Image (tube, coloured by chain):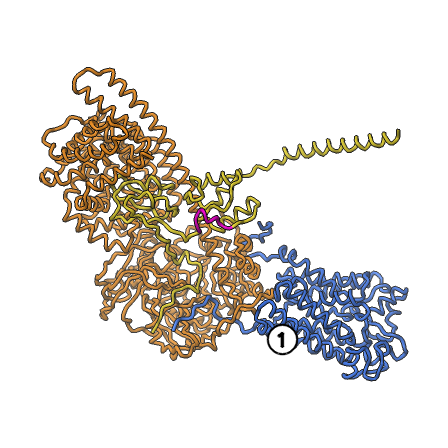
């Protein structure tokens, strides 16, 4: 019998890519549950649809590329992408929205660039932006928290709604969306943005029913759920604190400064942090290792820049939320950031920053 | 009249601009002249210096000169594809595959004189382009293997065919960590 | 150059007094697994059937073998020695017989065979007489260093750097850090050594202190070894400068650079050494070996090896003899191969160790562990998956590299970019690959890239050298051409003159014929290459001078003449006029030589002379080339030789110094001395060549001294030549600058071509170099074959050859002296003294080769060969 030959190190930490991805998915669970609780079973339907699409797409494309798709599926990266996309789109968006989005994320953004590890952009966010630009109506049909709506659709309703546009009882999406008082409800970010645009002050904007005296029913709790999962990830050393830290800090600083400058025209930092998908973005989306910066210094810059862009777009841009845009913008800057934030190597006076030949 | 005037002004303006920019460019070309390595030197740097003549030129420098004058870059078998690639980078041309007419890329070898058979004719000494063979007439010759470029040129002149080209042996220091090719011993 | 080191010495002391340490970035925490073996005391090992002792077990150069096949050696007897400072000897681990000397699978990841001595133990385990140092503190440091070197001590922590070099730094030492960290999982060799032999380790540290005079000594031990820490504390409590410092367990804290960072927060500059930041680090095992060497005189022939892993029944810490095959250790520990999916032996730890391709690999000085993991412990590596850029590797890297970028560039063979990312600062600790979730063998990629870069650089160097040599050769050819043209011109003039004087007596006729022949030859030479021409020309000129033919040598001359005639005939279709000249050439040559041979070896019998004459005539032609009196004809030869000298010059001096040193048994300690001597001798050798005729007594003495070193018996001389040749090679490696110096020397010599003395000196050097190179090439393997055959042949076959070689040399010398003597009126004894010098300088091996040559020539139809040669020459001249 021959001797086995291998190059050192022979010992490996028992945590492979699949395990890393799985842990990220587990960390998403509290947030998903809360989201389901507040916004209905549509979330779960979307997630299921997205996962199915992702797995099928990934498998077929790998088959076409003559790669071993079994292992690729087992690395859970496609599933994670699917989940992130599914929780980002409105829970009762038509089924084809999430299917197209997931297909786009896996086939175009990931596999066409060479598969896992080679994609320049965050697949979930690129798909989200594509959907938002292509199907603005469907992508903005956010439900208010269920406690505010007249109808509380069950799981069957959710499935019906996603596939037909009507609940099992025949209510249209518009009807589902309408609140007790008969007004169509928007997301808190939308509400504030619209309110501020109409000349209302921030405080007056908060009087809307969806806030119910807090920073937005449901959204606040969902963000807390994702925060919990994110902290777990940091603790488990799946992600570093640098990106979420930088992102949250930048957002807080920007919002804080502007809030101090004019508390009437600009929302408070807390409002910005716990509304929209900032927390989800900070811990789960921007930290996607493939498309994020790889040096610690670079990660702080990367995260902070995303936070900054999110604030800019939320406040002055055309969209109520902007995680996806900000992440994509910064994805493009990653090589530059990485190049200029190389750590000083042991024994060197300073880093090599010469232009490589 | 005004039309003529307009044409004249336009011509004048363009002419003036041309003179001004021409002057600037002319000045810049003198002021910022790049004193680079002459091209031949740069090409010669990239060639493997075996001086084997397989390219059809009597040594690497002449071939470098020829490349600079427009000859093909794929005539150097000892350099192989790596050299062609570097030459292509330098010359800004497409990297082509090695011209088989000039030989094929081979593993590195050095000459070895079977000393019992050497008659001391000095033919090989004269043939060696890098003076890597030692000996005098009627004395046995030997190759300084550290200096031998493996050019093959000494093999043909030898009247008694006592020169072998021996592949260089890998040593632990020159080992390329090709772990899969370790001759694994069968153990019963 | 004195750098201000930060933090300062005082800050470091203060920090450590407060039990604070620094940290290094990154690092990983692999499962320790030390409990498998850390409670087992070190056992002695039974003798294996065979011991395989690689000649080189350290970083540096290997020594020369000083024992022979079949010799009986005693335990602790040195097997190699070297005057090179970067060589440490190896010793026999037990008494026994040398069974074989040859390549054996090496304790290296490549498993490439290396020169190895095989000893069959005689089971007596008989020690050689040991000579411990009495009261080392009263001895000069050099003596202690020498003892350490002679005991073969090299770093036992991993790299195997010769200890005596590390113990004699050129800069001030602030800290000596004794490395007892042993951060790799599983290994307990140092741990057990510290627990059981703390006192001896401390003694070793005492010796180091004496040698290095540091301000402070720290003994760093990872805090997962509390017993070792306690043992060392007890052992060191009386010495106030010794402090045992427990450091946090984190891999790779035991790396030299990392430990320095932890202890002092100083960073060893890139491409620098720890001494650049005032630190010297030694492993505890090395300290133990130093104490052994100094206090009991025992060389390093055994070390502690941990045999562990769950695939052995009884893990062990063993005093393993250097050279014991791994299989023997595995047998002792009860290796159960079935517990592994595939046989799998790791030498070293799980992080940096390497797998063995055979269990016949010997234990060497740096072997600290044999790990035999089951598949549960160390799983089969899964296929590499794509990098997900998670940067876990960068977080783990202890030297703050970006392993991921290095990986991309290494994989894509973008070697310059990889270097831009400081590839060569990678310490190959394996932390990055350990944490990689995609199971990418990162370190392997780096190793391949590093090897590629090194090879590329080597090739670049080589091609630069080849270019240089090519260009210098081209230059030489041009010069030769010019010299030839000049000669033609003179020859033509001479002929014209001769023609004008025509009508005189027969003597004039001969002269005229000679001139014609010369002119013709010169023309021919134009077609053939330089040295060939010079030889012939030379011969002609010489014969011209010595045309006084003596009758009694005609028997011998006739044969030569006939042959020469025959050969010349072949040429005669080009020019018919040379036939008379040919006989002229041959006939004077032979007698001239015979005369000389007679002078030197009168006992030579007549038939021998007849037999050898043919060959001799030819050989003479060649030999005489150098001592032609006309400058013009000697110039091409000079040029030729000057080229050879380029490589010969640096080594000739080194060569003379080496035997002297090794004879004295003054081993490595005197690096500077050797160098100085070398330089000095180089100059002297040079002077020698210039001054011999001025009876420069000291220089001559110098030479004589060198030569007198030469052993009397032939085989020893051959061996010495080989040894010299090897030493030369080593010197060449060691001293680039010397080569440069000698090149300038060559230049000087070349300029002095006209000087006949430098001429002979160059020739000497060239022939010596030739012999050297022959020897070098044959190296060890052929030593054995060359030795007996050469010796035998030399003895049986030719006293003739010997005498002849001597005669030639003498003739040469005579010619030289004759020329210069005109001025100096040298005493008669002078040339003979010189010639004896030269004779011994004309290295034994070259003599042996000559002997071989002679014999070969006689046996295998010399005439036929000469004809073949002539034909070839003709062909080339036609071309």
Residue at 74% across, 61% down: A308
With respect to residue C475, does A104 lie above or below? below
- Determine the image quadrant of residue C41: bottom left
Look at the image and tell me whether residue C680 can be seen.
Answer: no
| Colour assignment, chain B | yellow
Q: Is residue C208 visible?
A: yes
- Res. A241 image quadrant: bottom right
Residue B101 is covered by the magenta coloring: yes
Residue A79 in the image: x percent, y percent? 65, 74
Residue B24: x %, y % from top left: 69, 34
Image check: C708 left or right of A71?
Answer: left
Q: Report the residue at 22% width, 52% height from top.
A: C787
> What residue is disc 1 on?
A22
Decide: few, some or many residues near mark 1? Use Cα within 10 Å; few <14, some 14-19, many ≥20: some
**Residue B140 covered by magenta stretch:** no
Label the blue chain with its letter.
A
Residue C633: percent from left, percent from top = 28, 29
Q: Secondary structure at mark 1?
A: helix
Depth check: give the residue in front, C723 or A121: A121
Range of magenta residues: B97-104
Magenta stretch: dominant SS? Answer: loop
Q: Is residue C385 left or right of residue C200?
A: right
Left or right position of C696 against C329: left
Q: Image point 32% across, 42% down: which residue?
A: B157
Residue C370 sits in quarter: bottom left
Q: Compared to C315, does C521 lie above or below?
A: above
C70 sits left or right of B69 in the view: left
Identify the hue of chain C. orange
């Amino acid at each position: 019998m021959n001797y086995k030959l291998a190059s050192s190190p022979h010992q490996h930490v028992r945590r492979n890519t699949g395990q890393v991805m799985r842990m990220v998915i587990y960390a998403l669970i509290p947030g998903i549950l809360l989201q389901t609780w507040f916004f209905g079973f549509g979330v779960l339907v979307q997630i299921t649809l997205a996962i199915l699409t992702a797995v099928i797409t990934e498998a077929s494309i790998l088959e076409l590329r003559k790669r071993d798709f079994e292992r690729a599926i087992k690395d859970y990266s496609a599933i994670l992408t699917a989940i992130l996309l599914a929780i980002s789109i409105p829970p009762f968006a038509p089924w084809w929205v999430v299917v197209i989005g997931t297909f786009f994320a896996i086939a175009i953004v990931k596999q066409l660039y060479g598969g896992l590890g080679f994609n320049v952009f965050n697949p979930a966010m690129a798909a989200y932006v594509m959907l938002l630009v292509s199907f603005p109506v469907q992508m903005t049909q956010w439900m208010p928290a269920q406690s505010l709506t007249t109808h509380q659709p069950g799981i069957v309703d959710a499935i019906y709604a996603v596939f037909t546009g009507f609940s099992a009882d025949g209510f249209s999406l518009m009807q589902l969306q309408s609140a007790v008082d008969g007004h169509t409800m928007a997301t808190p970010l939308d509400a504030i943005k619209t309110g501020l645009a109409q000349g209302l002050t921030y405080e007056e904007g908060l009087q809307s029913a969806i806030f119910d005296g807090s920073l937005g029913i449901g959204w606040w709790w969902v963000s807390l759920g994702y925060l919990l999962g994110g902290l777990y990830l940091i603790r488990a050393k799946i992600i570093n604190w640098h990106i979420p830290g930088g992102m949250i800090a930048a957002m807080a600083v920007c919002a804080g400064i502007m809030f101090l400058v004019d508390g009437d025209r600009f929302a408070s930092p807390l409002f910005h942090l716990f509304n929209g998908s900032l927390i989800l973005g900070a811990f789960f989306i921007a930290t996607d290792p493939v498309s994020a910066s790889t040096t610690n210094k670079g990660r702080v810059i990367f995260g902070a820049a995303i936070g900054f862009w999110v604030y800019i777009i939320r406040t002055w841009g055309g969209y109520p939320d902007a995680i996806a845009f900000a992440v994509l913008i910064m994805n493009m800057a990653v090589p530059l950031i990485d190049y200029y934030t190389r750590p000083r190597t042991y024994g060197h006076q300073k880093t090599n920053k010469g232009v490589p030949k | 009249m005004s039309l003529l005037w307009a044409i004249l002004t336009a011509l004048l303006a363009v002419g003036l601009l041309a003179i001004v920019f021409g002057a600037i460019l002319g000045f810049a070309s003198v002021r910022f002249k790049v004193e680079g390595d002459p091209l031949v030197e740069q090409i010669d740097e990239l060639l493997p210096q075996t001086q084997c003549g397989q390219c059809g030129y009597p040594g690497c420098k002449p071939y470098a000169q020829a490349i600079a004058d427009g000859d093909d870059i794929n005539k150097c078998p000892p350099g192989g594809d790596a050299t062609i690639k570097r030459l292509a980078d330098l010359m800004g041309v497409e990297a082509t595959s090695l011209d088989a007419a000039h030989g094929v890329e081979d593993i590195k070898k050095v000459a070895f004189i079977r000393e019992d058979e050497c008659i001391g004719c000095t033919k090989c000494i004269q043939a060696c382009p890098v003076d890597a063979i030692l000996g005098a007439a009627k004395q046995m010759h030997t190759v300084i293997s550290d200096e031998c470029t493996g050019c093959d040129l000494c093999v043909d002149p030898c009247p008694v065919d006592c020169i072998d080209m021996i592949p260089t042996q890998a040593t632990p220091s020159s080992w390329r960590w090709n772990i899969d090719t370790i001759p694994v011993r069968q153990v019963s | 150059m004195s750098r201000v080191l930060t933090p300062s010495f005082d800050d470091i002391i203060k920090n450590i007094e407060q039990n604070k340490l620094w940290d290094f970035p990154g690092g990983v925490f692999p499962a320790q697994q030390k409990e498998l073996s850390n409670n087992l005391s070190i056992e002695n090992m039974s003798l294996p059937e065979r011991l395989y002792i690689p000649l080189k077990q350290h970083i540096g150069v290997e020594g020369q073998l000083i024992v022979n096949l079949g010799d009986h050696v005693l335990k602790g007897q040195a097997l190699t020695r070297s005057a090179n400072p970067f060589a440490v000897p190896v010793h026999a681990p037990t008494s026994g017989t040398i069974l074989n000397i040859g390549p054996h699978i090496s304790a290296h990841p490549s498993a490439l065979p290396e020169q190895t001595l095989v000893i069959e133990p005689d089971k007596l385990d008989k020690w050689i007489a040991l000579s411990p140092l009495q009261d080392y503190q009263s001895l000069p440091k050099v003596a202690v260093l020498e003892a350490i070197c002679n005991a073969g001590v090299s770093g036992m922590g991993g790299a195997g750097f010769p200890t005596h070099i590390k113990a004699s730094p050129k800069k001030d030492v602030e800290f000596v850090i004794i490395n007892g960290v042993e951060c790799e999982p599983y290994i307990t060799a140092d741990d057990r050594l510290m627990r059981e032999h703390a006192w001896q380790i401390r003694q070793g540290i005492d010796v180091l202190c004496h040698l290095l005079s540091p301000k402070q000594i720290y003994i760093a031990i990872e805090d997962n070894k509390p017993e070792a820490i306690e043992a060392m504390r007890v052992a060191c409590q009386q010495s106030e400068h010794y402090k045992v410092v427990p450091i946090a367990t984190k891999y790779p804290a035991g790396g030299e650079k990392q430990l320095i960072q932890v202890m002092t927060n100083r960073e060893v500059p890139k491409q620098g050494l720890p001494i650049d930041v005032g630190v010297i680090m030694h492993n505890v095992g090395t300290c133990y070996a130093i104490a052994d060497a100094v206090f009991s005189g025992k060389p390093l022939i055994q070390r502690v090896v941990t045999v562990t892993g769950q695939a052995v029944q009884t893990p062990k810490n063993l005093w393993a003899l250097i050279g014991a095959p791994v299989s023997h250790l595995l047998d002792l520990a009860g290796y159960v191969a079935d517990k592994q999916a595939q046989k799998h032996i790791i030498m070293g730890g799980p992080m940096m160790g390497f797998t063995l391709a055979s269990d016949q690999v010997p234990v060497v000085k740096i072997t600290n562990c044999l790990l035999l993991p089951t598949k549960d412990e160390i799983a089969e590596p899964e296929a590499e998956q794509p990098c997900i850029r998670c940067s876990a590797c960068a977080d783990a890297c202890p030297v703050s590299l970006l392993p991921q970028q290095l990986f991309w560039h290494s994989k894509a063979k973008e070697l310059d970019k990889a270097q831009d990312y400081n590839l060569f600062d990678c310490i190959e600790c394996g932390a990055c690959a350990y944490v990689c979730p995609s199971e990418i063998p990162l370190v392997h990629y780096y190793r391949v890239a590093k090897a590629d870069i090194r090879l590329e650089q080597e090739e670049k160097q080589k091609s630069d050298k080849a270019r240089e040599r090519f260009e210098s050769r081209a230059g030489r050819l041009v010069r030769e051409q010019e010299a030839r043209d000049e000669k033609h011109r003179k020859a033509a003039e001479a002929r014209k003159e001769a023609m004008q004087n025509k009508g005189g007596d027969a003597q004039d006729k001969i002269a005229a014929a000679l001139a014609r022949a010369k002119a013709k030859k010169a023309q021919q030479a134009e077609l053939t290459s330089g040295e060939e021409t010079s030889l012939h020309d030379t011969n002609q000129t010489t014969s011209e001078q010595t045309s006084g033919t003596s009758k009694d040598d005609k028997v011998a001359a006739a044969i030569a003449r006939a042959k020469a005639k025959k050969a010349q005939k072949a040429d005669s279709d080009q020019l018919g006029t040379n036939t008379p000249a040919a006989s002229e050439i041959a006939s004077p040559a032979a007698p001239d030589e015979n005369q000389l041979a007679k002078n030197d070896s009168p006992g030579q019998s007549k038939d021998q002379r007849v037999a050898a004459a043919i060959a001799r005539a030819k050989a003479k032609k060649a030999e005489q080339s150098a001592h032609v009196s006309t400058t013009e004809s000697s110039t091409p030869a000079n040029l030729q030789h000057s080229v050879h000298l380029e490589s010969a010059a640096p080594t000739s001096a080194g060569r003379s110094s080496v035997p002297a040193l090794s004879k004295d048994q003054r081993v490595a300690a005197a690096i500077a001395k050797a160098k100085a001597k070398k330089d000095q001798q180089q100059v002297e050798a040079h002077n020698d060549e210039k001054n011999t005729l001025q009876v420069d007594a000291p220089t001559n003495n110098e030479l004589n001294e060198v030569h007198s070193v030469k052993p009397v018996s032939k085989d020893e001389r051959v061996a010495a030549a080989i040894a010299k040749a090897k030493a030369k090679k080593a010197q060449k490696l060691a001293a680039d600058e010397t080569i440069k110096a000698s090149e300038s020397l060559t230049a000087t010599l070349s300029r002095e071509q006209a000087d006949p003395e430098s001429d002979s000196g160059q020739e000497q050097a060239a022939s010596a170099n030739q012999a050297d190179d022959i020897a070098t090439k044959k190296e060890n393997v052929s030593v054995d074959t060359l030795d007996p055959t050469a010796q035998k042949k030399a003895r049986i076959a030719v006293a003739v050859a010997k005498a002849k070689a001597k005669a030639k040399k003498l003739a040469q010398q005579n010619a030289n002296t004759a020329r210069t003597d005109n001025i100096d009126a040298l005493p008669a004894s002078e040339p003979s003294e010189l010639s004896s010098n030269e004779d011994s300088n004309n290295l034994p091996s070259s003599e042996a080769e000559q002997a071989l040559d002679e014999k070969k020539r006689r046996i295998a139809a010399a005439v036929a060969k000469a004809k073949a040669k002539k034909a070839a020459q003709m062909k080339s001249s036609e071309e």
